[in-house]
Image (spheres, rainbow, N blue to C red):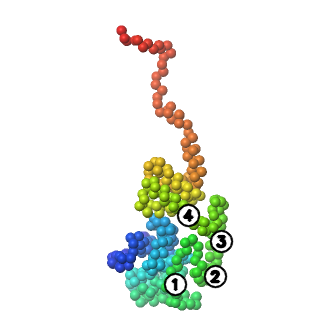
Amino acid sequence: MAKFRMVRTDFWKNPLVSEEMTPEDKFFCLYLLTNPQTTQIGIYKITKKQMAFDLGYSIESVHSLMDRFIVHHNLIRYNPETRELAIKNWGKYNLDKGGKPFMDCISSELKDVEDLSLIQYVSKAIQKQEIRSLFESFCEQEELVFGKEVSGQDENDTYLEPECGELDDTLTHRDTRRGQKEEENKKDNKKEKQQQEAFNPNIKKNPDTENNQKEVDVKEIIEFWDNNGFGFSNMNAKEQLLVWLDDSSFLQPKEVILKAMNIACANNKRRLSYVVGILKNWVNDSLLTVEEIDSFYESQNSVPKHRQSTESFPAGRAIPGGFVLDLTAGEE
């Protein structure tokens, strides 16, 4: 059964929302409050990739929005290692009920939280003492296990997710299992990178060079979009197209995207849906490079055209062998 989240009508009267948030901020805020991953306790697991998919944004746009909500608005915290997000004022507006079933549900969800400092973060806004005490009991467990005062945590520790997707080295590894998990992730990332380099030897090993190349690719695609009539002000469509640079199986993503856009222009179909349709067809046909795409089309066009022309028109009646053309016939 699908979950249904209520948003209070006074959401729109909040000065932070009405005066400081952009339209995109408001949309993102409503998503954080109502997406399918939300829980009763205001702490839930979610990835940037999932957010981008749900919202139709690029991963870069999601990271920028999260940065605004963590640093500028100070409304959420995010642990990139456990992929857990906590909403600061969730308890103020949603944790005001009572009763055993509700308390049992909260207790069950609190047990699933890996980063216990997020429980402390959410608990500060809870006004109902019974529920707040339950949250704080889990914080006390953290103090016993890790031997430190959670309440002394710096409010500015916002768990910003690193741009490159690597684990943040400033996070404290609280047990041996977590350290082992990080080592395993590093090995997996290294193996994946080696596999990518094997498929594409042109991949640069310098992170700065990779970032610079990506910026060049993005700029080239955007310029083609703007200069060829796809819609200069259609920012959402551009962002959705740029997702194909990272989240696709193409070995030459930029070149393949540009080729699809060229085909759209040739057919006078300058729409995102048309370009994406072309890209999806190529993925389904396992055409992952420009060379494979060109070879596929060449094979499709190799059928002789004269066969179609001879079959399209009837040959007519045959002329008798003894027939003589007389141009003066019928003039008498």
Vertical order, 200 against 302 (above or below): below
Q: Earlier in the sequence, mark 3 or mark 4?
A: 3
Residue 211 placement: quadrant: bottom right
| Residue 17 x/y as whole percent | 37, 76
- Identify the residue at image location x=60%, y=79%: 169
Find residue 166 and report its horizontal and vertical position in percent.
Answer: 59, 73
Q: CA distance from mark 2 to mark 1?
A: 18 Å
| Residue identifier under label 3 | 187
The residue that disc 2 covers is: 176
Height in image: 242 above or below 5?
above
- Seen at 52% across and 79% down, the residue is 159
What is the spatial separation of the Cα atoms under label 4 and label 1, in whole angstroms? 36 Å
Amino acid type shown at disc 3: Lys
Q: Nearer the viewer, residue 203 or 108?
A: 203
Callout 4 secondary element: helix
Q: Residues within 10 Å of mark 4 (few under 14, many from 20)?
A: some
Residue 214 badge: 4
C-beta proximity under 8 Å, tags 4 and 2? no
Alpha carbon distance from label 2 to label 3:
17 Å
Give the Cα separation between the discs numbered 3 and 4.
24 Å
Query: From this viewpoint, is residue 159 visible?
Result: yes
Which mark sits nearer the N-terminus, 2 or 3? 2
Of badges 3 and 4, the one in the foreground is 4
Residue 22 lies in quadrant: bottom left
Under tag 2, what secondary structure? helix
What amino acid is labelled 2 in the image? Thr
Location of residue 133 with respect to 242 vertically, above or below: below
Residue tagged 1: 117
Residue closer to the observer: 330 or 1: 330
Residue at point 46%, 66% (across, down): 57
Tell me the element at label 3.
Answer: helix
Give the amino acid at mark 1: Ser
